[in-house]
Amino acid sequence: MNDLPPTVTLNFRSDNVGTASPEILRAVEAANRDPAASYGDDDYSAAVNQAFSTLFETPVTVFPVATGTAANAISLSCCARPWGAIYCHQEAHVHTSEGGATEFYSGGAKLVALPGEAYKLAPATLQDTLATAERGIRNRSQPDAVTITQATEYGTVYRREDIAAIGAIARDAGIRFHMDGARFANALARLDCTPAEMTWRAGVDILSFGVTKNGGMNADAIVVFNAELAEPLSYRLRRAGQTWSKMRFSSAQLLAYVQDDLYLRLARHSNAIATRLGRELGALPGIELVAPVEANMLFLRMPDRAVQAITAAGARFGRRRGGVIRLVTRFDMDEAEATTLVDIVRRALD
């Protein structure tokens, strides 16, 4: 039999395709050794609030949930009335990719999609929109909340000053401020600031805290900074079937994820590979980066022959309108995947 070189996986489809980190798996295994109280009355779940309060430097209430969609939709249902308006960027995941979950769980609140450069909601745009919101007019949705995605659906990252500016506008307008942090760790690693500085100190009331995309097995979380939202959220989660009976397994994942900054180490690795790909692919003729590479995603246009070459090699990747392709890097991605992809594209363009 001929000795063949090992096959290099070229899976840039999503960070959701990644494995669970060994640390997460060990934590789940440890939680499986003995019986434990159900519905969050176990020791692991009791420890989550303290661990996250330490992480965020303020008392918080944490609710494990199964998915990021659940985290977003049910968080926003606590921030907006059925006749309320929730402002977001026009490319926001809650608007484009969650099947109307926010509208469903809120009982009908309206997502108001706004434009913004670099796929981010600009503070000035939010301010101008609120100024013309026609409060008290019953045939208009009433301002209730604003949500931003950190990092955005195109891998760009809100700077701390922009988050703080949106937070100040929300506070002055008397509306809630939600952050969709499906890739929270990747954004935080990029900004190199503290979790507190990127959230509640900038005015965020409630956070969807992503874990699954960055080494988790099957758990995300809602982190509540504004204590007024905690109790109603607990009831909404129960009605939505998001109160886990064996919550210790999701809580164990959350604890392991933040212990010794595991979440940041994993995110820095995927960010570094994305940065490398952006640098090396962006230097090749005919390739255009559609958005700055600031987290673990690249959006680019490349000549058809290059797309055909990576497709023929078995690469998996996302496609967007306008001929844009999406490459997502993962915490468990080997550098060989990036090297192989760049080599294929380079040969196709020679």
Image (cartoon, rainbow, N blue to C red):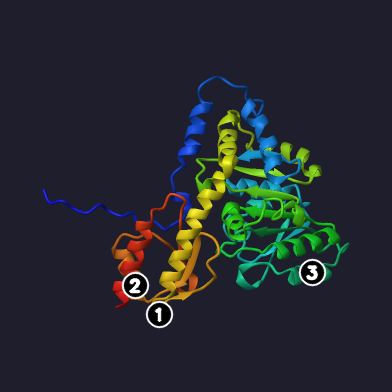
Q: Which mark is residue 231?
A: none
The image shows residue 268 at horizontal and vertical percentages of 52, 54
Residue at 70%, 46% in the rendered image: 56
Label 1, label 2: how many angstroms apart (C-alpha)?
10 Å
Q: Is residue 274 above or below residue 231?
A: below
Q: Is residue 51 left or right of residue 227?
A: left
Q: Amino acid at mark 3?
A: Gln
Residue 118: name its quadrant: bottom right
Label number found at residue 306:
2
Q: Residue at x 54, y 71 (%)?
A: 291
**Disc 1 + disc 3, Cβ < 8 Å:** no
- Tell me where residue 149 appears, x and y as whole percent: 63, 59
Name the image quarter holding residue 113. Answer: bottom right
The amino acid marked with disc number 2 is Ala
Gap in angstroms between the C-alphas marked 1 and 3? 39 Å
Direction left: furthest residue: 1
Q: Quadrant of the C terminus?
A: bottom left
Q: Is residue 155 above or below residue 254?
A: below
Tell me the kind of residue under disc 1.
Answer: Gly
Q: Separation of disc 3 and disc 2 at Cα?
A: 43 Å
In the image, which disc is placed on residue 127? 3
Dot 1: what SS?
loop
Judged from the image, the secondary structure of the residue bearing numbered disc 3 is helix
Q: Cβ–Cβ below 8 Å for labels 1 and 2? A: yes
| Left or right of 165 on screen, residue 249 | left
Residue denoted by label 1: 286
In the image, 31 versus 314, the foreground residue is: 31
Callout 3: few (<14), some (14-19), or many (20+) C-alpha neighbours within 10 Å? some
Residue at 80% from the left image edge and 42% from the top image edge: 227
